[in-house]
Amino acid sequence: MRHRKSDKKLGRKSPHRKALFNNLVTSLLTHGRIETTEAKAKMLRGFADATITRAVGVHALIAKGDNASPAERAKIVHAHRIARLTVKTPEALQRLFAEIGPHFASRKGGYTRILKTRVRKGDAAPMAFVELVGLGPQAAAA
């Protein structure tokens, strides 16, 4: 019985599922918008929002630059290390703390948007776009 089990298994064991969402979050941060199935998109939203919250939380400390105290610098390093567990490329990690964190600094959550798009031809799976609010593919390319 699956009573009171909140997340979907997506037909994968837990290490495979963790790797899948780490890769999806990395792609989302790199490109600003990705297309995946609706089930994966709904699960991805929580992982992506938690990762972006790490960058938003230390945005004010990063803005201080050299004026940050040693304790504040330790918080910045800790946030980078925790984010690195999810974000797998240095480019995506740099973009997370340099662009995405400052962009969402005034928001209290809801960093991603899901747009239902089509039905995949091969297996009739419902597809959806997941994009960063205000940082879609046009903003990522600029």
Image (cartoon, grey):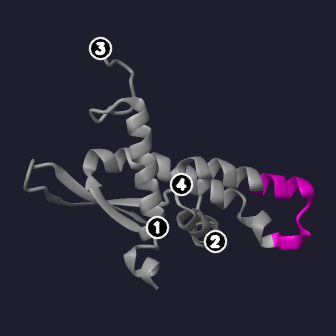
Magenta extent: 64-76
Q: Distance between the residues labelled 4 and 1?
A: 10 Å
Whether pointer 4 and pointer 1 mark residues with C-beta atoms closer than 8 Å, the reply is: no
The image shows residue 37, relative to residue 55, as above or below, that is above
Mark 1 residue element: helix
**Percent position (x, y) of residue 35?**
28, 61
Picture residue at 46% right of the left edge, 67% below the top: 30
Give residue 67's mark.
none
Check the image and name the residue furthest to the front: 89
Q: Distance between the residues labelled 4 and 3?
A: 33 Å
Q: Which amino acid does label 1 sit on?
A: Thr
Is the residue marked by circle 2 packed among few (<14), some (14-19), or many (20+) residues within 10 Å?
Answer: some
Whether pointer 1 and pointer 3 mark residues with C-beta atoms closer than 8 Å, the reply is: no
Picture residue at 43% right of the left edge, 81% below the top: 141
Q: Which amino acid does label 4 sit on?
A: Val
The image shows residue 12, relative to residue 107, as above or below, that is above
Q: Name the residue under label 4.
A: 87
Q: Which label sits in the foreground, 1 or 3?
A: 1
Q: What residue type is labelled 3?
A: Met
Overall secondary structure of the magenta stretch? helix
Check the image and name the residue furthest to the bottom: 142
> Is residue 38 one of those drawn in magenta?
no
Q: Which sits earlier in the primary sequence, circle 1 or circle 3?
A: 3
Q: Mark 2 points at which residue?
A: 98
Q: Mark 1 points at which residue?
A: 30
- Give 5 or 19, whichever is nearer the viewer: 19
In the image, 106: left or right of 117?
A: right
Picture residue at 48% right of the left edge, 53% below the top: 48
Q: Name the residue under label 3.
A: 1
